Image (spheres, rainbow, N blue to C red):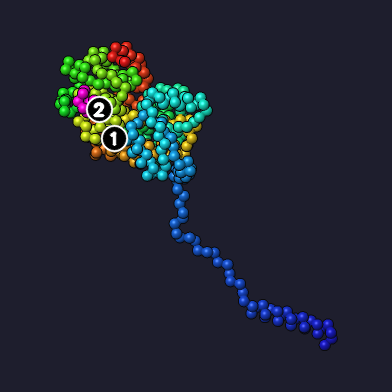
Amino acid sequence: MNGRTKGKVIFTGLVCLAAVLLSCAPQPAPKVKPPAATGPRAVQPPGWQQEWEKTLTAARRERNLSIFTPAGSAVRAQISAWFDEKFGLEIDWTPLPAAEITPKITRERQAGLHLVDIQMGALSRQIGELKPAGFLAPVKPLLVLPEVLDKKAWFGGDIPWADNDKAYTLNNILSPEHRIAINTELVKPDEITSYNDLLEPRWKGKIVMMHPVLNSRLPAIFYTIMGRDYLVDLARQRPVITENQRAALEWLAQGKYPVMIFTRTDELMEFIRAGAPIRRAIAREGTTLAGGGLSFSMLDRPPHPNAARIFVNWWMSKELGTLLSRFLLLQSARLDAPTDHLPPDIMRDPSFKYVNAETEAFHEQQFKVRDLSRVIFGHLLR
C-alpha cells in the first residue's frame, strides 16, 4: 500500500469515527411553544375611572378647597363631614351674607388674588353678578361620573343647568318651594291654604317678611303665580320687613308674629328639627321649584382645581342627592334618589303647577320684579 492510499484510508476512518461520536452525543431538546394562557386577562378600568382616580390623587395633594357661601352653620358642618369622610378632603368655608360675596371676590381680583374655588348660595348672585363679571369658569368640562352625565337620571330629562349656556351653574336639589311658614300654636293648618288668605284683615301687621328687594326671589314668586296686583295688596297688609332671617324665625317660633314669608329653607329646617312650633303652609295656586339656596358655580383660576372637580361631581351624585334630601327634607333633582323620608307636600306632584326658579330666565324676571318691589314696598323699607 503506497503512502497516498494509506492516507485516504486514515482520513475515511477519521470521518466515520466523527460520525459515530456525533450520533452518540446528547441532542438539544426541541423548542416547544408555551401553552396559551387560559386565565382572565387584566381589564383596564374605563377611561372616566382612570381620570377620576388621577384627579382624586391630585386633589389629596391639594388637601382642601375653598367655598364662599351664606349657608347656615349646620349645613356647612354636615357637608364638610360628608366630604371629609368620603374623600379625606377638607372644606375651607367663608360664610358671608349673599350681598357681600361679589364685592369681596371683586376686591380680591383687583388685588390679583384667586382665593376661592366655589361659590354656593342663591342663584341670583351667580347668574346676575359673578357670571356677567367674567368670574366664573365652566363646570361642564369637569363632569366625568357616568351617573352625573346620564340625562335620564334627572327631573326634566336633562342635567339641571341653571344658566342659559348650560355650562356654569348647577344644583342637586329641585324641591317645591313653599315660602309661607306659620306658628302652629297660633295658626291652624287650614287657615292659610291660598296666597289670598294672607290678604285677610286679621293678618294685617302680623306677617314678618324677608326684605323684598334684597331677597327679590320672594316677590318674583308671587308675581309669577299671582300677578302684579297681588304684590300691591300684600304691601297693604303692612308686613314687617327684615333682612335678618334668623331673627325673624325666632320671632315666629316665639309667637311674636304668627306668619312669616321666608327665603332660606336650610335655616327654617334648623328650627323645625330643634322642635320649634313651625311648619310650612301650602298655597293651592302653585309654587316654584327651587334648590334650597345651594346652587353652585366654580370661579375661574381656582386655587384647588382638582379638589373642586371632585366636589362638583360628588355634589351631583345620587349619594349626595340622597344625603341632602334626608338632611334638609327637600327633594333631589335626581329621579333615582329615594323619597320615602319626605312628607307628601315636599315631593313634586305631577298634578301641581310649578315654575322652575332655578333658571336664568326666572332670574331675569326676578330682577325686573325687584325694581317693581322698590316702588310697591318702598314705604315699608327702612
159 left or right of 242 in image: right
Which numbered disc flags the more N-terminal residue, 2 or 1?
2
Q: Which mark is residue 328?
A: 1
Q: Position of residue 223 (x, y in %)?
A: 29, 17
Q: Furthest residue to the bottom?
A: 1
Task: Decide if residue 160 is in sight here.
Answer: no
Q: Residue at x 22, y 20 (%)?
A: 207
Pointer 2 residue: 250
Local crowd size for mark 2, using a 10 Å CA cut-off: few (<14), some (14–19), many (≥20): some
Q: Position of residue 229 (x, y in %)?
A: 26, 13
Q: Residue at x 61, y 74 (%)?
A: 27
Res 5 quadrant in image: bottom right
Q: Amino acid at mark 2?
A: Glu
Image quarter where the C terminus lies is: top left
Q: Amino acid at mark 1?
A: Leu
Q: Position of residue 159 (x, y in %)?
A: 37, 33
**Magenta span has 157?**
no
Residues 4 and 88: in front is 88
Local crowd size for mark 1, using a 10 Å CA cut-off: few (<14), some (14–19), many (≥20): some
Res 313 quadrant in image: top left
Q: Residue at x 44, y 26 (%)?
A: 104
Total numbered labels: 2
Q: Which residues are the magenta region?
A: 250-257
**Magenta span has 256?**
yes
Q: CA distance from mark 2 to mark 1?
A: 19 Å
Residues 51 and 101: in front is 101
| Helix, strand or loop status at disc 1 | helix
235 left or right of 320 in image: left
Main SS type for the magenta part? helix
214 vs 341: above or below: above
